[in-house]
Image: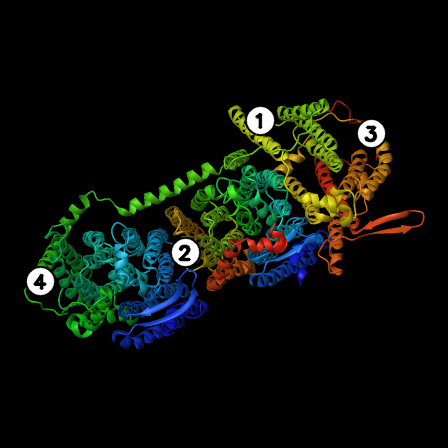
Amino acid sequence: MTHLIIAPILVPAIIGALTLLRTARHTLLGRGLSLGSTIVQVAAALALFAEASTGTIRTYALGGWAAPFGVVIVLDRLSAMMLLLTGLLALGVLVHAVLTGLDRRGWHFHPLFQFQLLGLNGAFLTGDLFNLFVFFEVLLIASYGLMLHGQGGARLQAGMQYVIVNLVGSTLFLIAAGILYGVTGTLNMADLALRIGAAPPGDQPLIRVGAQLLIAVFALKAALLPLHLWLPRTYANTSAPVAALFAILTKVGVYSILRLTTLAFGENAGAVAWAPAGWMLPAALLSLLAGFLGVLAARRLRLLAAFGVIGSTGTLLSAIALFEPDATAAALYYLPHSTLSGALLFLVADTIGRARKREDDRLEPDRPFAGMGQLSLLFLLSAIALAGLPPFSGFIGKLLILTAAEGSAAAPWIWAAILIGTFLALFGLAWAGTMLFWKTTAEEELASSSWRKAATIPAWGVFFLLAALTVFAGPATRYAEATAQQLFAPEAYVAAVLGPEGSGR
Amino acid sequence: MDLLLISVLPFLGALAVSLAARWTRTAQAIIAGGFTLAAVLLLVSKAPAVLGGQVIGSRLEWIPALGLNVEYFLDPLGLMFAGLILGIGLLIIIYATFYLSAADCSARFLAFLMLFMGAMLGIVISDNILLLLVFWEMTSLSSFLLIGFWRHLPEGRQGARMALAVTGGGGLALIAGMLVLGNIAGSYQLTEILIAREAIQTSPLYPVALVLILIGCFTKSAQFPFHFWLPQAMAAPTPVSAYLHSATMVKAGVFLLARLWPVLAGTDLWFYLVATTGLVTMLLGAAIALFKDDLKALLAYSTISHLGLLTMLFGFGTPMAAVVGVFHILNHATFKAALFMNAGIVDHEVGTRDARRLGGLVHLMPIAATLGTIAGLSMAGLPPFNGFLSKEMMLEEATHTVWGGLEWLVPVIATVAALLSAAYSFRYVAHVYFGPRRDDYPKAPHDPGIGLWGPPAVLVVLVVLIGLFPAATAGPLVQEVSGVVIGAEPPYFALKMWHGFTPALIMSIVAVLGGALLLWRHGSAERIWRALPLPVAKNMFDRFTALLVTTSRTITDAIDTGSLQRSLFVFFLVAIGLGIEGMSAGEYAAGARDTIPASSIDVIAWLALVGGTVAVMVSQQHRFLTLVYISVVGLVVSLGFIHLSAPDLALTQISVEVVTILLLLLALNLLPKRAWPTSSRTRRIRDAVLAVIGGGGVGWLSWAVMTRQPNDPISAFHWAQAKPGGGGTNVVNVTLVDFRGFDTFGEIIVLGIAALGIFALLETAARGASGRRLLAWKPDLIRSPERHPMMLVVGSRLILPMAIVVGLYLFLRGHNLPGGGFIAGLVFSIAMLIQYMASGFEWAEKRRRIERHALITLGILTAAATGLGSLVFGEPFLTSAFGYFHLPLIGEFELATALLFDIGVALTVIGAVMLALSQLSNVAQRAEKIEHVEHPMDIDPSRTTETNL
């Protein structure tokens, strides 16, 4: 089973390549391959999750070249959790895309989808800075293709902004990685941690520049204010299932911030220590407020959901920005919630748009339609989840963050921002819900044939994941705590990657 | 465990009812009622033990990390409230079954109601304040659904949203307050907190916690200035009003005041905040109630007033006042729920609940009239009903209360409020049931069936029984509950009708007589009231929400303009700022590495590079020109690579340069030849300044990095191991296919996806508005009469085999000398690109055998298969192997698995370039409307140089 760790990378790469073939295009074969691949990824992620939850850190040296000279991939609790989250979310989104026929609206849905998963899984697994860049590229280009999938002029325009801004981000990533490599002479993240710690004081300002620029790129991915400008239109204008998958894209940024900062820019990093801590908290709080203010301001449900993603990522980062184990544990519990609840609302928005037809997802009254009850219930549940109200995991996550922030000097700000943000979200979502489901025009009910009931299965699936996260909050928080402890004691990670003698260098 | 069962029964009921959505209404009511009844019976079975002083608890671990566990406890206070919630809930279920019309979806209604019941029950039996918060917000949410149940009514929607905003928003403050409280007490367990009075009241955070908690309580219990949501919530069906807005939900705030009384009450801050709020609310609610014509509005304001009364009593902070508060909670729940149901009956049977259109119903609806009159008189505070008892005791407490040194203030206001209360109660009774019979009722009124009058009748019986035999019926319960609220043995009290000629009795008489007088003069009083310039809280709230929405839109629209320039500007600004921040930390030391002297050729090349870059910017509006300058830059960079001993990079750069320039030329053909300026002059200057700072910064960083030598870089290992470990002398190639083959594996996939991206982009561009523009496109450059110039075609044919040979050569030697799969792939691509350009897409396309997509697939799979091969030998993915072999004629040669991997790289590169090319050509063909041509070397005489621009 030593090779299982590369399954999340190899499976989508190979299946992605296979689904490119003409025989797999718009055929049952293509769908089968893609679905099968995603299920295998979930299964692999589950197995890896089980392994990581024992606390072991597994490494895998590609090409047999030991770290730091070759590329290694590393599985620890955090990676395993992200893999599992990605797999489960992807399965939901894929089933939704298949059920609604989105995958047949363009040419390459399945290859792009699988390559997107490849990028995600790779980014979560890699232990090498340049390799992370490679997977960021895979992610970005695949997401751009997926974003354009289907049609629409608005999609084209928003996509242009998305891809250009992110390519500039990639360039900055290269500059930052270049600085770090040029000064420390290594690309392996564990090795980087050691070398930054041992760097002569004269080098440290340069390393800090590298660190800050790198984190800025991650913040761009995470849509942290003021680097969030690309997100709302991109997410609102792409097809909703794709936007649902994108809910995890911002989390790649969050993951990378957490990974690199705790590992390489942490306690032992001298002048580089906690480099982003100074500016990240205010930025996160502003994102939180700007996001939920956008929820209130949005005139379309998908735009609302996009702002919700910004707001909940801001909430997440405001906990992470404290760079302290308790707050990180809280954030790690909130992270899957934030991802799933954002995705859920996009899936629901898609079905609502289909069912209403004329007004699509605009927050304007439309004709009543058959099956409104089920959809309004789904919307209610997803709205409660997104706003972070009881009884679902969002509320627990927020309580965790609030209590974890208690000791911080910034506690009043964090508390105020989170509670005000929740209020704004509550208000905005209540308004949206009443517009969509209560205030209907006095026309005849649309026939039930306008949307397929089966299309809500994936949304329900995602909701049940949230429900499970709520019911099993005890084990989940324990896992999050253990993960935070693992992150804040990076010695084990370094030792696992470089070996006991390597870490002593 | 029984408590757990009780707590989940309503939720199970909600689930069961929604599953029975297709059953009859009666069946649904039986299900809902059954679950409720089961809970009631369970609760009753616990009552003796609880009243006997035993506290029943149950605990289920949920989130120990947070201190949020499913902890319930049942003490007398919880018991009383649970009894009210379940008992009245049961009556409401019966009542609602008969009240709702056939068009209403009763399953939905009952499910919401059961949800609410469960949430409310959770609040009163929670032993964990975080759990309490969960239930607290759930009551807000479920009440939102219930208020908006008639979703076609605009006032229902608005009322629901307002109630949610106020009570849900207050709940958020409560969250903060409870967390602070738990923090002070060191536990979130209620029973732990309740014994931490000393620690809490001496804590510097006490005022913060208190204010936040009170905001939660006051919003929920509709206290001034948050009272306005309650009347708006009357848009709900009457059973909801009777249940939520009289007996239960609005009591949640009062419940929490009582619950936390032992630890929060007793301070001046508590007294002035709570008692004053209660006093003001009591007076204000009663005054407004008197002038409401809508019966439900009248009852709503009366509820506000009574909630104020309760708040005031708990705010007094004296044990005796707490006893009275407890007693009045009980009494108010009975008569007010009965009155709401009574108003519902009137509305249901008469078709209106406007007091001005009612009157004289006593003859037509004797049962309803009897019930309404008894409950109304109890509300007025008349003996022998229960309302009288607690009102008397309240007035008694008021006389003992000094507010800010003023002894008369509280008693006077309490009396006035009681007077107003009597007046509106009399009005309810007199203007609905008495007076002359009218002949303009909207419907023909008659008494309803027992389903509607039965439930309130049960409550009215309680009103009378408690009124007549208070000590026997309510005495023990009040005794025990007050003990819990006070947290000690309650003071001696006697629940009885006659206390002698006390000041309270006189105040009471004044109130009743004054109330009757006021009703008599209601008309003139109303004129005075209407003339008063009173602010309407609802309007203020509406303005607030409108302002909130406008502000949010203004801010959001101002930030999110969708401008790419802005996105980039901000990003560059942030990057520069962070770069400066990084440099300002610590002591920077310049690098010590020796620099290479610059020859004059270096300087010339450098100047060409700078000149090329400047030219790109200057010529930015002339797209072809820009492309030319970009290629100059690329060329100089390639030369630079050669000069700095990086032939691999130079080869890659130059071939990439050729491919991109060719593809860009194809793309530019279809675009307008000039780009128009998109920014104003000032903005361009701003951007230029930013660009100079950013570019200078990156330049300086490069300098700083290149002038230092890292200690023991990993590249030293790569130099040393390329031949012995990787089997090649070209370190760059060994790095690409071996040391870091995994990166290459990823990058070829990126290339493949990029081709798919171009495909998707052009696919989208070819449709819709841009597609129409494309179809309307007219060639805007002078065309050669020769579509495919003969010289070019012939030349390209000759070049093809040579280029292939060069590619193969570069490919094969790649492991040891400059070259490799990537470069070779590009060379092959260029060879083919030239064919397409020279002989036309169609001609070349006909001779293509392998599908482009398949090439990419094949490339990725080849690379993956090579990597997977090592797994067979138990080695990690992508482990290379190589060996030296000897063949006659050829001599010794090397075979490496890396070569196979490189084949994958080359295939993917070719596939990606070809896919991009084909899609560009497709679009071009569509735009140019090219007719079919058989021959590659045709001349079209009609295409002359005169083609207009």
Q: Quadrant of residue B243?
A: bottom left
In the displayed structure, B778 sits above or below A491; it is: above
Q: Which mark is residue A399?
A: 2
Marks 1/2 same chain: no
Q: Neighbour class for label 4 at 10 Å: few (<14), some, many (≥20)?
A: some
- Left or right: where does residue A164 sit relative to residue B137? right
* Residue on which disc 4 sits: B505
Marks 2/3 same chain: no
Chain identifier of the residue bearing label 2 in the image = A
Is residue A232 something one can see in this rendering?
A: no
For discs 2 and 4, the disc positioned in front in the rendered view: 2
N-terminal of the pair, mark 4 or mark 3, is 4
Direction left: furthest residue: B501
Q: How many angstroms separate mark 4 from mark 3 (CA)?
A: 116 Å
Q: Helix or strand or loop: what does disc 4 sit on?
A: helix
Amino acid carrying mark 4 in the image = Leu
In the displayed structure, A333 sits above or below B44; it is: above
Which residue is nearer to you in this view: A478 or B540?
A478
Chain identifier of the residue bearing label 4 in the image = B
In the displayed structure, B353 sits above or below B903; it is: below
Q: Position of residue B657 (x, y in %)?
A: 72, 34
* Residue on which disc 3 sits: B789
Amino acid carrying mark 2 in the image = Leu
Q: Position of residue B337 (x, y in %)?
A: 26, 64
Q: Position of residue A239 (x, y in %)?
A: 57, 48
For discs 4 and 3, the disc positioned in front in the rendered view: 4
* Residue on which disc 1 sits: B677
Q: How many angstroms separate mark 3 from mark 1 (CA)?
A: 36 Å
Q: Neighbour class for label 3 at 10 Å: few (<14), some, many (≥20)?
A: some
In the displayed structure, A76 sits above or below B61; it is: above
Amino acid carrying mark 1 in the image = Pro
